[in-house]
Image: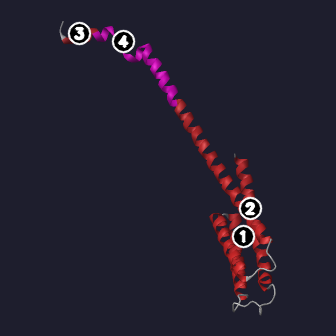
Amino acid sequence: MNAEELRQALVEALPPFYQTFDFWISFVLGAAGVVFSIMAYIEAAKAKNAAAAAGRSVKIQTVTIELTEILQRLDKLDDEIEFPEARDLLSEVSRRLRRLVGPFSNTPDISENYNQLKAALKQAKEALEGVRPSSLSTADQTPNAVYYALQGHFGTISEFVAEISGALEKKTIATEEDE
């Protein structure tokens, strides 16, 4: 028997692979693997989106808590506060507010309040500069001048911070409802 006859005999003796039971088992298992892979990818994408939403919610809640701490600090303004303490307090509050609210400054329901907050912080700084002691002696300074110069501005700052905090809480509630 030559090579051609041997090949022809094998072709006639063995059916094509796609006609065998082994082929169909492999095909069904392979198709099931592809389907399960697609389902796993879809679920992973949903989990990723849920995790991102949860992360945003936690970040917003953390910012809201820190804003509440700032509000409490502003509400406890001592009427005998001296210029250096007031300067430090205003600097700290300004820095923290800009750091906390800055990432949300382009958000439609926060941007206007943020711009007004920055203006209020600037006005408070200018008011504080107006009562800067001219010498090391504070004897010639009006009693409680620093407090009176800042109390109204700190009240305005508190109002804007409260409005921003409320807008952020609203975002947290919206994020949690979406989940």
Q: Please say whether residue 16 is one of the residues in the magenta stretch.
A: yes
Quadrant containing the C terminus in the rendered view: top right
Q: Determine the secondary structure under disc 4.
A: loop
According to the image, label 1 marks what residue? Answer: 113
According to the image, label 3 marks what residue? Answer: 6
According to the image, label 4 marks what residue? Answer: 15
Q: Nearer the viewer, mark 1 or mark 3?
A: 1
Residue at the top extreme, as displayed? 1
- From the top left corner, tell me how far across and down residue 82 is, in percent: 75, 82
Amino acid type, residue under disc 2 in the picture: Ala
Structural distance between the alpha carbons of marks 4 and 2:
72 Å
Q: Please say whether residue 11 is one of the residues in the magenta stretch.
A: yes
- The residue lying at 72 percent from left, 70 percent from top is 113
Q: Give the class, few, some or many, for how many residues have Cα within 10 Å of label 3's Cα (few <14, many ≥20).
A: few
Mark 2 vs 1, N-terminal side: 1
Q: Which quarter of the figure has residue 44?
A: top right
Mark 1 vs 4, N-terminal side: 4
- From the top left corner, tell me how far across and down residue 154 is, in percent: 77, 75
